[in-house]
Amino acid sequence: MSGYIYALTNESIPGQIKLGRTVNHPEDRAADLSSDTGVPTPFTVAYFVAVSDDVQAEKSIHRTFKRQRVNPKREFFEISVDEARAAMDKLTYRYPVDGGLSMRRFSGDDMLYSVFNAFWSIIKMFARLIIGILLLFSKQRQLKKSLRSLLKMFK
């Protein structure tokens, strides 16, 4: 199922990052975890990525950092945000969303995220238009087959 892989930090748990998955927005997940009475300060979303298979992507990132895992029954790891970000960015290529381009962003960049989504929509529209024109004028069977495959990426 498509969803998100997130990295959460909490000032009450220095040096550790919570790596998990959710089908809801990671900010909502952070709020849910922060509402627990056992946590003195709220969780902050340090980074997240959208993936096509959140279950497998979470398993993959947990395997990547298995030696840094604090407790095998918990999702806390002694890693930096930069290490988490690098590993999460790799997941976007292994579990791509939107024809291979995943929406990844830092927390708080809502404007950048919106601009990126609008820009990506425009790129997809023009790609479909150009591929459609090429299909109309193409006479080679193999080229048409390749163009149709390419067109599927931009739907």
Image (cartoon, helix red, strand yellow):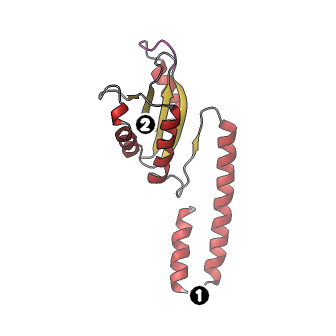
In the image, what residue type sits under mark 2? Answer: Arg
State the image quarter where residue 111 is shown: top right
Q: Which of the two discs, 1 and 2, sits closer to the camera? A: 2
Image spot of residue 125 (x, y percent): 66, 62
Considering only vertical position in the picture, is 119 above or below 22?
A: below
Say which mark, if any, is on residue 4. Answer: none
Image spot of residue 20 (x, y percent): 42, 34
Q: Residue at x 37, y 45 (%)?
A: 56
Give the CA separation, mark 1 to mark 2. Answer: 47 Å
Q: Is 136 in front, or is 27?
A: 27
Say which mark, if any, is on residue 21. Answer: 2
Q: Residues within 10 Å of mark 1 (few under 14, many from 20)?
A: few
In the image, what residue type sits under mark 1? Answer: Lys
51 horizontally vs 119: left or right: left
Magenta-highlighted residues: 38-42
Q: Is 2 in front, or is 105?
A: 105
Q: Is 140 in front, or is 106?
A: 106
Q: Cβ–Cβ below 8 Å for labels 1 and 2? A: no
Q: Quadrant of the C terminus?
A: bottom right
Q: Secondary structure at mark 1?
A: loop
Is 91 magenta? The answer is: no
Considering only vertical position in the picture, is 114 above or below 7?
A: below
Q: Residue at x 68, y 41 (%)?
A: 112
Q: Is 38 in front, or is 67?
A: 67
Q: Which residue is mark 1?
A: 139
Q: Residue at x 52, y 85 (%)?
A: 141
From the image, give the main secondary structure of the stretch colored magenta.
loop
Q: Secondary structure at mark 2?
A: strand
Image spot of residue 124 (x, y percent): 63, 60
Image spot of residue 72 (x, y percent): 29, 29
